Image (cartoon, rainbow, N blue to C red):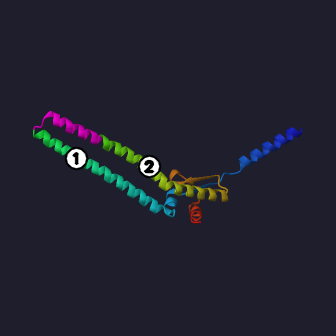
Amino acid sequence: MKKLTIIILCLLATLAGFSQKAKFGHVDYGALMKEMPGIDTAQQALIDYQKELEETGQQMVNEFKEKQAAYMQLTNSGASSAILKVKEDEMMKLYERIQEFASISEQDLQQKQLALLQPFQDKLLEAIKKVASAGNYTYIFDVSTLAFHNESDDLTEAVKAQIKK
């Protein structure tokens, strides 16, 4: 009989937990990221790095165009097939280097973005967790992923205040 009473009490406690209404909140993650202290410096560093990569890539493309123009002149002047073959090989190697550079640059840029922005994202997530915990929120969503949020509290300002602490 004692075991049955304990089982019933556990069952009632479980059902009582399910009957509590979940508490929902939402934040504007993008707006909060823009408000992060120091984010503009990180974004500018990322822009500068991207420009540096683009300039190097453009130099390689310009070199390819110059080689292509020289090849066309040789073709029009009736150069031997041996010379044309050497020039074609040079252009092909340069083209492959350009493609490789573009691929590596894209990866480097993504890694740089992650390295620069991850600390800000971590700090923002920690602030969201603190606000959620303090307000007993079950879920907090980003408004950019929600189609509708009628019965949800806007916690953007509370998280903004938490970030500035």
In the image, the segment drawn in magenta is 78-95
**Which is more N-terminal, label 1 or label 2?**
1
Q: Identify the residue at the far top of this view.
A: 81
Q: Amino acid at mark 1?
A: Lys
Quadrant location of the N terminus in the rendered image = top right
Q: Is residue 72 left or right of residue 18?
A: left
| Identity of the residue drawn at 42% across and 60% down | 44
Residue linked to disc 1: 65
Q: Nearer the viewer, residue 73 or 47?
A: 73
Q: Is residue 20 magenta?
A: no
Secondary structure of the residue carrying tag 2 is: helix
Residue linked to disc 2: 110
Q: Position of residue 146 (x, y in %)?
A: 53, 51
Q: Position of residue 134 (x, y in %)?
A: 66, 59
Q: Nearer the viewer, residue 90 or 5?
A: 90
Q: Identify the residue at the far right of this view.
A: 1
Q: Is residue 97 left or right of residue 68?
A: right
34 relative to 102, above or below: below
| Identity of the residue drawn at 85% across and 38% down | 4
Q: Amino acid at mark 2?
A: Gln
Q: Is residue 81 magenta?
A: yes
Mark 1 packing: few (<14 Cα in 10 Å), some, or many (20+)?
A: few
Asked whether residue 152 appears in the rendered view, the answer is no
Question: What is the quadrant of residue 70 in the picture?
Answer: top left
Q: Position of residue 141 (x, y in %)?
A: 57, 53
**Magenta stretch: dominant secondary structure:** helix
| Identity of the residue drawn at 24% across and 45% down | 64
120 relative to 78, above or below: below
Which disc is residue 5 wearing? none
Asked whether residue 71 appears in the rendered view, the answer is yes
Q: Position of residue 67 (x, y in %)?
A: 21, 44
